[in-house]
Image: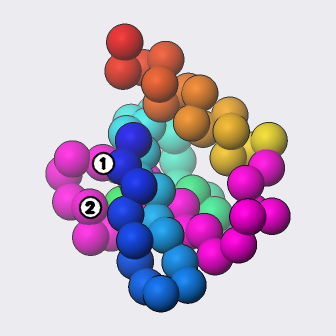
């Protein structure tokens, strides 16, 4: 997983989740290129929810 400052008010999280189809929130990787398959944009702390935590856990499990 990658945490990247995108703007003054947003960070982007990069994930490598090869078998996950993109969704409205779990987007294609965009500027992260071939290193990651998906990206999530975060603009406020309330966006860190159970869905995001599950993607973080899944990405971690697939990396070990």
Helix, strand or loop at mark 1: loop
Residue 27 appears anywhere in the view: no
Residue 22 vs residue 52, the one in the foreground: 52
Disc 1 crowd rating (10 Å Cα; few below 14, some 14-19, many 20+) is some
Q: Measured from the top left, where is residue 46 in percent x and y?
A: 80, 64
Q: Measured from the top left, where is residue 38 in percent x and y?
A: 43, 53
Residue at x-position 36% and y-position 49%: 2
Q: Which mark is residue 36?
A: 1
Residue at x-position 79% and y-position 49%: 49
Q: Quadrant of the N terminus?
A: top left
From the image, tell me which residue sits under label 2.
32
Left/right placement of residue 9 relative to residue 28 reads: right
Left/right placement of residue 33 relative to residue 11 reads: left
Residue extending furthest toward the left? 34
Q: What segment carries the magenta color?
A: 30-49
Residue 20 higher or lower than 62, as above or below: below
Disc 2 crowd rating (10 Å Cα; few below 14, some 14-19, many 20+) is some
**Magenta region includes residue 37:** yes
The quadrant holding residue 41 is bottom right
Residue extending furthest toward the top? 64
Residue 22 higher or lower than 8, as above or below: above
Residue 10 vs residue 24, the one in the foreground: 10
Residue 57 vs residue 46, the one in the foreground: 46
Residue extending furthest toward the front? 8
Q: Measured from the top left, where is residue 9 in percent x and y?
A: 55, 84
Tell me the CA gap for discs 1 and 2: 6 Å
């Amino acid at each position: 997983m990658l945490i990247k400052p995108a703007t003054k008010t947003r960070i982007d999280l990069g994930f490598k989740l090869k078998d996950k189809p993109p969704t409205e929130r779990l987007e294609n990787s965009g500027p992260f290129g071939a290193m990651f398959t998906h990206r999530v944009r975060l603009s406020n702390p309330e966006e860190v929810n159970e869905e995001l935590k599950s993607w973080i856990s899944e990405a971690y499990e697939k990396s070990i």
